[in-house]
Image (tube, grey):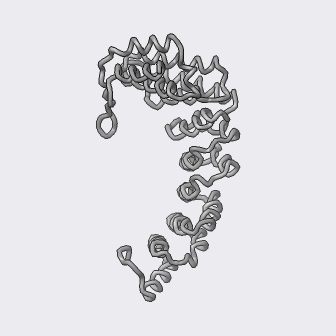
Amino acid sequence: MHRLPTLAPGTRAVIEAALDASDASIRAVALRLIGQHGLPPPRARDALRDPSPEVRIEALRMLAKHGPAGHDAARSAFHDSDAEVVVEALHRLTGALTVDEALPLLSKERDPRVVKAAVSAIQRVKAEPLAAPLFEVVRRLDTHNNWGALCTQISGGVAPREVREAALELLLSRIEGQAAPTGVSWLDVRRLESFVRASNAPESERASVVDALVRLTRHRDAFTRYDAAEVIRGLAVDHATRRFVLRDDVKEALVALAPDTAMPVRSTGTGGQSTAWSVGRMAEKALDALLS
């Protein structure tokens, strides 16, 4: 039936009758078919109370196609007993989740899957009340996604001093703990940039972050040296942050890195990752940005 371009009245009647099937998988497929063919959701709201999480998830997907009604349905599912249903509801609210709605979903009492989905739904939201809860999430569940949301608060200048300082201490500790020759995670190197961009950070704090970037240009791992030079370049071309890297030691570090002919290669789960230029070429591009 998924392959049918349209549904005849008799076929539609069969599908709607299947909403009462004793088998939950049949009820779920019936809802999916009704949603696929753009038919009005006559009983989708009733399906949100179905005993099967599979059916409740299909109901959310179906209602999501009906604008505000779908958002209302998603919000009503935040307290569902099944974490996957809540996760689905959050996926339907990405970009529309409010700060007040997000805060309870970030608590340590919530299922980690729900927390992860809530963080994704507010990934680009800048709001001071989110900073502390997001930092607690990072300390509990250290993943790229969670750090990304926290860095949005930091770079956006809305993270309070105590949150920003604790996050920087944690990040620098992570970087120091990644011993050569394995190299520092490229994500961690780029996260340093958020602290330089934080408009509410004192200059001394930003200077300590630049100090860390300078140290990383001398790291034993070629990819780490490349990443550090690339972050410095990004800061140098941005008028808002340029002055923080206009330092003699930064220039000296890049000059020392310029003869570096290494072409970094990093193993990944799907093969390998390589850079477009050598470490030295990236250092030259960063130096050009500083001197232009």
Pick whichever, 278 or 90, lies toward us: 278
Which residue sits at x=63%, y=57%? 78
Count up the numbered dots: 0
Q: Position of residue 43 (x, y in %)?
A: 58, 77
Tell me where residue 209 appears, x and y as whole percent: 56, 20
Q: Is residue 176 visible?
A: no
Q: Residue furthest bottom?
A: 10
* Residue 151 to residue 205: above or below: below
Q: Is residue 195 left or right of residue 232?
A: right
Quadrant location, the N terminus: bottom left
Q: Position of residue 36 (x, y in %)?
A: 45, 72
In this rendered view, identify the residue nearer to me: 262 or 178.
Answer: 262
Residue 111: percent from left, percent from top: 58, 48
Q: Residue at x 57, y 20 (%)?
A: 244
Whether 4 is drawn above or below 75: the answer is below
Q: Quadrant of residue 198?
A: top right
Q: Is residue 182 above or below residue 28?
A: above
Q: Which residue is located at x 64 percent, y 57 percent?
A: 79
Q: Is residue 220 above or below residue 20?
A: above
- Residue 224 shows in the view: yes
